[in-house]
Amino acid sequence: MSNQNSLAAEEEKILRRIPIEILILSLMIALASLTIFDPLTALFIFAGGAFSALSFTWLKQTISKFLLPGKKKALISALAFYSIRLVLILGIFFIIIFFFSRKILAFVGGFSTIVPVFMVEAIIALSKMKKWKD
């Protein structure tokens, strides 16, 4: 039983760390982009990363609320909230495309920082599993 508790604590620690890592990586990329691009591009890169971190945090909180055992309408509510989340993300993208059509790739680049963060976390978790099995 304590092994399950330690695994749950480790998972929670990773889930709390991911948004911070997304913000740090997007800030590093935004600062590096200042050498090549204008400050507005760097701002959009960081804004994309911040939006990605907020989106991840919101999704984590929503899923943990709706997937509790004993709730029968949880799936319908979760799908409704996820649909609202998707509409909000698409709305942000359309606003950026409408007003700043040349900066959408910068925002997408910042928003996509979640991918390398997940990859690094997966590699770290797999390396810990390998150590645990040996």
Image (cartoon, helix red, strand yellow):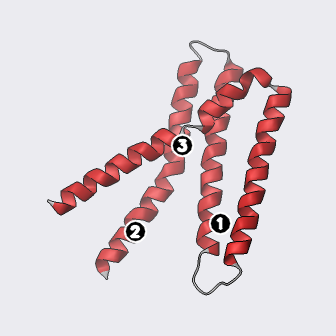
Q: Hey, which quadrant is residue 129 in on the image?
A: bottom left
Mark 3 belongs to which amino acid?
Ile
Tag 3 secondary structure: helix
List the residue tagged with mark 1.
62
Q: Position of residue 101 (x, y in %)?
A: 79, 24
Residue 9: mark: 2
**Mark 1 nearby-residue class (10 Å; few <14, some 14–19, many ≥20):** some
| Percent x, y of residue 49 | 61, 39
Q: Position of residue 112 (x, y in %)?
A: 58, 37
Residue 5 appears at what percent x and percent y? 36, 76
Please state which amino acid type lies under the numbered disc 2: Ala
Q: Is residue 83 left or right of residue 6?
A: right
Q: Earlier in the sequence, mark 3 or mark 1?
A: 1
13 or 85, which lies in front? 85
Earlier-in-chain disc, 2 versus 3: 2
Residue where numbered disc 3 is placed? 114
| Three-letter amino acid code at the position of disc 1 | Thr
For residue 27, what is the image quadrant? top right
Residue 125 - label: none
